[in-house]
Image (spheres, rainbow, N blue to C red):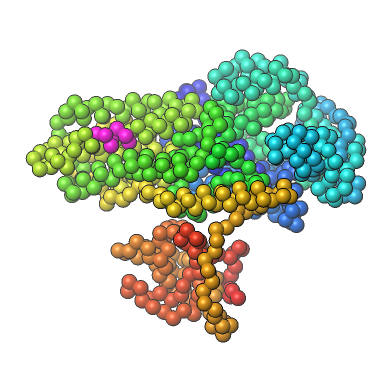
Amino acid sequence: MDSKYKRHLVTAALPYANGAVHIGHLAGVYVPADIYCRYLRMRGEDVRFICGSDEHGVPITIKAKQNNCTPQEIVDKYHHIIKDSFERLGITFDIYSRTSSAIHHKTAAEFFRKLYDQGNFIEKESEQYYDEEAGQFLADRYITGTCPKCSAENAYGDQCEKCGSTLSPTELINPRSTLSGNTPVMKKTSHWYLPLDQYEPWLKEWILEGHKDWKTNVYGQCKSWLDGGLQPRAVSRDLDWGVPVPVEGAQGKVLYVWFDAPIGYISNTIELMPDEWETWWKNEETKLVHFIGKDNIVFHCIVFPSMLKAFGDGYILPENVPANEFLNLEGNKISTSRNWAVWLHEYLEEFPGKEDVLRYVLCANAPETKDNDFTWKDFQTRNNSELVGIFGNFVNRAVVLTHKYFGGEVPSAGNLVQADKEVLAAIPAIRTSIEQNLETYHFREALREAMNLARLGNKYLTDTEPWKLAKSDMERVATILNVSLQICANLSVAFEPFLPFTSAKLREILNLGNISWEAFGQPSILAAGHKLNEARLLFEKIEDSEIEFQINKLNNTKESNNTNDTGQAASQPLQPAALPLKEECSYDDFIKMDIRTATVLEAKRVPKTDKLLELTIDTGLDKRTIVSGIAEYYTAEEMAGKQICILANLAPRKIKGIESRGMILMAKEENGKMKIVTPEERLSNGSTIS
């Protein structure tokens, strides 16, 4: 580690709160950033991992109009979806806040005001499209028309989604306002601009001379911008949603989102550490690293540093900006507007307990140097061949054999032969390689080295064949299993930054507490006589039917986009064909059912069963027990605290000796997966459903 720094401030690009997070965001930014922070913490470094929702800008106001609600309602909805999804994937932010917060508005307004008072802005008048009926200047996305490049209808004022061309509103043929449908007129308006051209000489020295170690895609894009000459950039916009421009005569104007959003890193740090934040932002012993996608390089390497330079007052600048390229999906560019994506919150519901599988695949296939492609078949292959077939197989064999031959206790190592010594000697070398790759932001290579340790263990067990030696040489079997278990213990450390849920499960199997990074490479983490817990599978195979369901889901989305002649994408993919109706029932039959809301107070596995959970629930009328066959879809931990709907007046019955009073309402999908039916909003327990 670089001893120059006493602390590490790591930021991840603020996701835009007009939609959920998808795998492109994860592969490009959040998974590598989390791996890096987890590693630093394991090394004992002082780390703060900062992020939050970017909640201002035109797309949010458009979404609000489409949904006939306020922008605040839109950002509230998606902020919570995004935050919850990150937490469930194990992304370890120290704070995940939002730019609609009062503290952010105050921080951003004060930042603008200081630059304004220092004379760092220039004010310019320009002409912009204006909707006379709506009485509003039109941002680029509020204008549609015919694309001048491909003649597609409904191109936006900034981009044609059919041909991908970047446009300006004045290039559109037959422009019209999305607010009224009328043809807009040109009208003069004034805005403040940050004169980036004035910072060009300083930026060239700081980046082109001082940061030649940056990734080639980052350095190359910065050089291209600087070689082309920088232009003043507007920092305000005519809009009614955002941080109001804090000067007189600026009614109806807000801070442009690109100016407002990066200040969110600062305001979120202030919210997290109100008394210490300046130590993290204004001290040369802090290392600042921005994790972003390639579409944000210019903002984090040129614009935001220029803002900090103009502000003065000792703000530090990023030491590195390890931006990734884009992740495509099944050969096509991910498109949120066309719903061509794998959404994180949907994945978590459809693949419960497989958070680490997604983390593994996205890191193993990370677009670090070029755009890469995610396919569901590759996802399945990596899980079944690598996680199940190599990592999981090795650990399971080592633990099962230890239980079989030594009662689950770590045997003594005995005399080490050359093969044993070579395997143990390889572990510190693998650790060094992982460290070097993580510290230079080569996460894909670091993960490959961690998997090489699992491969090493798998090959060692296969070559030594202790199950054959057990008939004649138990002393040698003891040595082989001791070495194998030491590899398992090291694997729990090596994979901790990448697969935290798996590492925790492995430590539980090995009956170990947390292990420091410094223990990685030691040949005797597990002492002889140490008692192991029972063997459990670290990973499960993913079946063809699960992958076919995901591919069909995408194909339905593609068909929907291809047949939608309005140019607007469907908000959800077409659903698989529903199951046929059951036989007709009478109203009298239906009215007998008393369906109510309830909250799960406690949940636990029913012993000696694979599918049953015993739930203690609060119905608002009483506390009762329900036994439900949902353990293959939900863990006991996931159920605790969840609000559910139950058939409350179902006759009691005994299941595995437990009286079950009621039944949970579940939805069964075409692929056989079951999901709990929950209220859209949390209701009082006992609320009736009719």
* Front residue (pair 639, 108): 639
Left or right: 658 in relation to 227: left
Task: Find the residue positioned furthest to the left.
Answer: 472
Q: Residue at x 63, y 42 (%)?
A: 335
Residue 455 x, y percent position in the rendering: 32, 34
Position of residue 629 relative to residue 386, above or below, is below
Position of residue 343 relative to residue 618, above or below, is above
- Is residue 84 in view from this perspective? no
Residue 143 x, y percent position in the rendering: 81, 42
* Front residue (pair 341, 400): 341
The quadrant where residue 16 appears: top right
- Is residue 153 in view from this perspective? yes
Q: Residue at x 45, y 52 (%)?
A: 546
Residue 94 x, y percent position in the rendering: 54, 42
Left or right: 85 in relation to 187: left
Position of residue 16 relative to residue 111, above or below, is below
The magenta stretch spans residue 290: no
Count of numbered marks: 0
Left or right: 616 in relation to 368: left
Residue 653 x, y percent position in the rendering: 39, 78
The quadrant where residue 470 appears: top left
* Front residue (pair 541, 525): 541
Q: Main secondary structure of the magenta part?
A: helix
The magenta stretch spans residue 455: yes
| Quadrant where the C terminus is found in the figure | bottom right
Q: Residue at x 48, y 35 (%)?
A: 365
Left or right: 546 in relation to 408: right
Q: Residue at x 46, y 79 (%)?
A: 650
What is the span of residues highlighted in magenta in the rendered image? 454-460
| Quadrant where the N terminus is found in the figure | top left
